[in-house]
Image (cartoon, grey):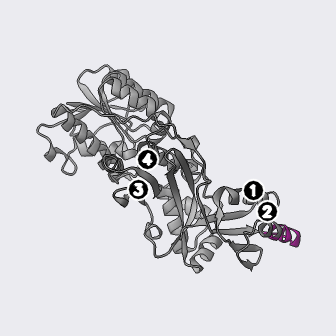
Amino acid sequence: MNIALLGFGTIGTGVYELINLHKGRFADNLDEPIYITKILDRDPNKKVDPSDHHCEIVTDPDLIMNDPEIKIVISLLGGMEFEYKMIKTALEHDKNVVTASKAVLSEYFAELNAIADEHHVFLRYEAAVGGGIPIIGSLNEELKINHIDEIMGILNGTTNFILSNMTENNADFDETLKLAQKIGFAEADPTADIEGYDVSRKLAILSTLAYGGIIRDEDIKKRGLSDVEAVDVEMVKSIGYVIKYLGHSKLLNKNQVYTTVEPVLFPNESMMGHVDSEFNIISIKGDVIGELQFYGKGAGKDATANAVVGDVLYVINSLKEERNPHYKTLDKDLHKMGNSGFSGRYYLRVHVTNNDELAYVMSVMNADKGRGQIVVSGDDVFFTTSEIQADVFDSLVERLKERTPKLFYARIYE
């Protein structure tokens, strides 16, 4: 059985090494050897390993799509529209597809599943969420017994590295982001990570599977991380908490879905509070099993390549045993309710430059009964509020930003 690889970047290289160069135990699990025979890359001068006589670089995707010997296409291109086109075309050419594209899946999940179902081929995407954490397979197994009604997780290695480094070294956000870019933990354009799109897309995939209806990135309420400062890390640490970037969804009343991606505070001694650097943690709650937590490397060449090759093995074994693909019906009518189903105490830091701004902040916080505990240090005013509903506090903050735009806030998980 021949395989094609679309994309020869960091993850693609890791997959190629596992399959064609026999890194790890991949070859030990096969009755006969398989190889990546074609790699799609825009650079015609890119080379495979000199010892590899099975594989060639191609720049024309038709050479892959029209090759009847290629039964599996691994799509690791990145981006959106071109990868969507390639995945769709491969499925329509009766080829099984393995991908790590959370962007494409979160936008075109229903369509691609329907095409795969129509053509009786597999569409596998374990690597799209959680890197090396086997969350997709585990979630599908639990759904055979449980009704899942809540998903919560630290799902982005870049932002978790930034927050961990800020906490350990009392560093500023901007300098930590530059460090993350320098060592390869952050992209040159980090928008998808620090503005929450990466987490939101992963949460959309997990929530769609868990709740049985389509949830897209656009349905998820999200708030970026770039307003956090070293002074916030220091203050939060002094009151026994740590800042994390969290994706959270829950299902209430059978069809109401509440979602949020935002910075939050966890107690120092909590499990979530101890997840650092590129590691991720994902929690799911079922009506029978209760809470399950999955922990591991959420990013990186080897962890993600491991998940991709695991899906390849699944497809190979299924074809050998003549198992047919099975796709869950995702037609439940879900009502997307934003973040109004979440509530809690809040940490808030507001930067004021004069007494008029201070008076305005105090009046807004007092009017909404959100003052709680107050600390004034230099030009910063710190609040720890009583319990407030999330959408109500968002509205309160928008009022504050009219006069004092330099602020940061995070809901507290007790």
- Single out the mark in the foreground, 1 or 3: 3
Amino acid at pointer 3: Ile
* Disc 4 target residue: 206
- Mark 4 and mark 3 in contact? Answer it, CB < 8 Å: yes
| Mark 4 element type | helix
At a point 19% along the width and 30% down the height, the residue shown is 1
- Single out the mark in the foreground, 3 or 2: 3
Vertical placement of 161 versus 113: above or below? below
Vertical placement of 17 versus 172: above or below? above
Disc 4 from disc 2: Cα separation:
37 Å
Among numbered discs 1 and 3, the one appearing first in the sequence: 3
Q: List the single residue furthest toward the right.
A: 356
Q: In this view, does 264 lie to the left or right of 138?
A: right
- Single out the mark in the foreground, 2 or 1: 1
Disc 1 from disc 3: Cα separation:
32 Å
Magenta residues (range): 352-362
Q: Is residue 128 left or right of residue 358?
A: left
- Single out the mark in the foreground, 4 or 2: 4
Disc 2 from disc 1: Cα separation:
10 Å
Q: Position of residue 358 (x, y in %)?
A: 83, 71
* Badge 4 density bin: few <14, some 14–19, many ≥20, Cα 10 Å: many
* Disc 2 target residue: 404
Amino acid at pointer 1: Glu
* Disc 3 target residue: 284
Majority secondary structure of the magenta segment?
helix
Q: Position of residue 354 (x, y in %)?
A: 86, 71
- Single out the mark in the foreground, 4 or 3: 3
| Mark 3 element type | strand
Among numbered discs 1 and 4, the one appearing first in the sequence: 4
